Image (tube, helix red, strand yellow):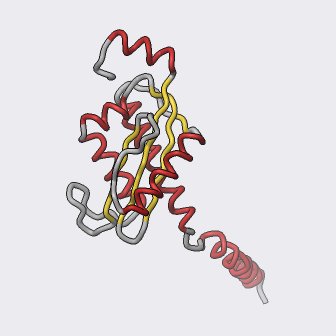
Amino acid sequence: MNENFWIITIFILSIIAFIPIAIEATSTEPLTEEQKTQELNNYIHKLINKERTENGRQPLTLNSQLTQLAIRHSKQMEKDQLMYHSSNNIEENVARIPQATNTIGCGNTRTTQSIADCVVQQWMDSYGHKQNLLTKTHTTTGIHAQCDNENCWITQNFRWNENEHNRQNTKTKSGL
């Protein structure tokens, strides 16, 4: 047999040997509900910080205490099947986003990215929610989306730098 035959044979065998590795590396198992929730929360956080930086504000950092408050409130809204603000005496945004193929103002909200896009857009279209998102003195946030088969119940809590917040509030009441 000639030398080219062996070179081609070795080349083909080496490719075949690596195919299962490539298939294994690219196949993914479906996300768990917890992973989907975390992905949605991360998308919302990312989009909020995008809005903040586009408006000359510092990004918000996630805070575990505020996140725990958001988790409790979103779960309670889902249980009650009712959207409302909590009585935690902190600034917050809440929303209910239907998981539907034609959500008013948002279109298809069946994916985590589309739900995140929808909630942040709705908050940016609402003066009070936008004010919370863009307040200069807000420094940390907690976010949680609690989704059932029909809706996502979303809470975002804010905390501010106390010294800066007090200084800004004595200058202006606009909050922006």
From the viewer's side, name the closer residue of 135 and 169: 169
Q: Can you see residue 163?
A: yes
Residue beneath the point at 39% across and 32% down? 52
- The quarter of the displayed image where residue 106 is located: bottom left
Give coordinates of residue 153: x percent, y percent: 39, 57
Q: Residue furthest left?
A: 104
Q: Nearer the viewer, residue 111 or 20?
A: 111
Front residue of 90/174: it is 90
Query: Which quadrant does the N terminus fall into?
Result: bottom right
For the image, the number of numbered tags is 0
Q: Is residue 4 visible?
A: no
Q: Is residue 96 left or right of residue 67?
A: left
Residue 159 vs 67, above or below: the answer is above
Note whether 154 is above or below 169 in the view shown: below
For residue 171, which quarter of the picture?
A: top left
Q: Quadrant of the C terminus?
A: top left
Question: Where does the image place residue 42, in percent across and percent down from the top left?
Answer: 50, 49
Rendering coords of residue 165 (x, y %)? 44, 18
Residue 137: x, y in percent? 44, 23
- Residue name at image x 47 percent, y 15 percent: 164
Q: Quadrant of residue 168?
A: top left
Q: Residue at x 24, y 35 (%)?
A: 127
Q: Is 84 situated above or below 14?
A: above
The residue at the point 42 percent across, 48 percent down is 155
Residue extending farthest bottom? 1
